[in-house]
Image: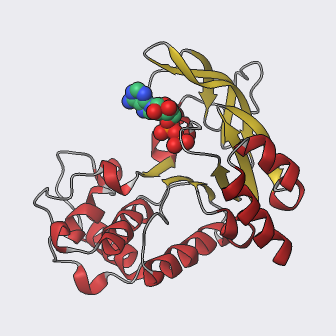
């Protein structure tokens, strides 16, 4: 295999010299990261830090001003089957007339092929995925008629049905109910047990230690990244959040209590 300079061929996601700009204004600057394999990784940083943009840049959903991303040493285009994405709930059109099973079955299309009929095995995998998130009773319910937390679980099931190697999730815990939070945590830990790499944009500093093994602290640049116990420190959080001290001091207080 040809190894690109600056990239680790064994890293699930190797990001080198990445800069992303909207309307010529950079929002991510010179990001270098080798995401570790088989870990649960939180991307943490203030609003507007570029967390969603980082995921979108990896998935070729926004143009890169410079730099490259390699998925196991190859381009995203060549490796897209290895990658699943759960977008932010607000970015999805929930009025689209489709039921929960339909949404989850869409996760199988990359395996079925777009114009081919859905096979029994695909429905079975889709139903299994709904079961894993506690939504099998709602398989035939229109997605517009589900609660926010239930919609989030259906999108998680869609990613599970894809049976990928790498999962990106953009704020899956944002404004969900307790049952959904529990279901998501269980799915994250199952994915980790089966050796998958899971990268989650996460805004709740309180639960970072509990839910994740690794963390990327981001504020336009990568402030620090590595194992939670090494990186998730008061000093690094201060560097990441700068002046937003109210939020920070609350988080630090809670950390101290753990
Ligand atoms: P985060 O996920 O950390 O809140 P984002 O990646 O969503 O940050 O956004 C980073 C910056 O880029 C913000 O200042 C945001 O306003 C800006 N931004 C995001 N998407 C767009 C877009 N499509 N066009 C222009 N600016 C954008």
Q: Nearer the viewer, residue 171 or 165?
A: 171
Q: Is residue 118 above or below residue 216?
A: below
Q: Is residue 195 above or below residue 242?
A: below
Residue at the spot x=75%, y=49% of the render? 36
Q: How is the image coloured?
A: secondary structure
In this image, 112 relative to 174: left or right?
Answer: left
Q: Position of residue 252 (x, y in %)?
A: 79, 63
| Number of residue marks | 0
Q: Position of residue 80 (x, y in %)?
A: 46, 40
Q: Position of residue 187 (x, y in %)?
A: 53, 73
What is the quadrant of the C terminus in the image?
bottom right
Residue at the spot x=35%, y=57% of the render? 89
In this image, 115 relative to 54: left or right?
Answer: left
Q: Position of residue 85 (x, y in %)?
A: 45, 50
Outermost residue, left side: 97
Asked if residue 38 can be seen in this view, the reply is no
Residue at the spot x=67%, y=37% of the render? 219
């Amino acid at each position: 295999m040809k190894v690109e300079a600056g990239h680790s061929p064994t890293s699930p996601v190797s990001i080198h010299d990445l800069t992303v700009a909207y309307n010529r204004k950079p929002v991510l600057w010179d990001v270098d990261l080798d995401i570790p394999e088989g870990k649960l990784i939180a991307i943490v940083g203030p609003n507007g830090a570029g967390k969603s943009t980082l995921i979108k840049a990896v998935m070729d959903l926004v143009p890169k001003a410079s730099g490259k991303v390699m998925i196991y040493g190859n381009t995203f285009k060549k490796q897209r089957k290895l990658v699943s994405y759960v977008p932010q709930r607000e970015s999805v059109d929930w009025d689209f007339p489709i039921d929960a099973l339909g949404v989850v079955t869409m996760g199988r299309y990359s395996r079925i092929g777009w114009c081919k009929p859905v096979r029994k095995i695909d429905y079975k995998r889709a139903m299994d995925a709904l079961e894993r998130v506690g939504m099998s009773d709602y398989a035939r319910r229109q997605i517009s008629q589900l609660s926010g937390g239930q919609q989030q679980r259906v999108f998680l099931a869609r990613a599970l049905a894809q049976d990928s190697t790498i999962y990106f999730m953009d704020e899956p815990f944002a404004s969900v109910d307790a049952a959904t939070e529990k279901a998501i945590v269980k799915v994250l830990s199952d994915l980790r047990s089966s050796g998958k790499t899971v990268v989650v944009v996460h805004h709740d500093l309180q639960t970072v230690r509990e839910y994740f093994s690794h963390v990327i602290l981001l504020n336009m640049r990568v402030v620090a990244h590595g194992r939670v116990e090494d990186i998730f420190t008061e000093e690094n959080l201060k560097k990441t959040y700068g002046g937003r001290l109210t939020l920070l001091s609350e988080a630090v207080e809670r950390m101290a209590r753990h």
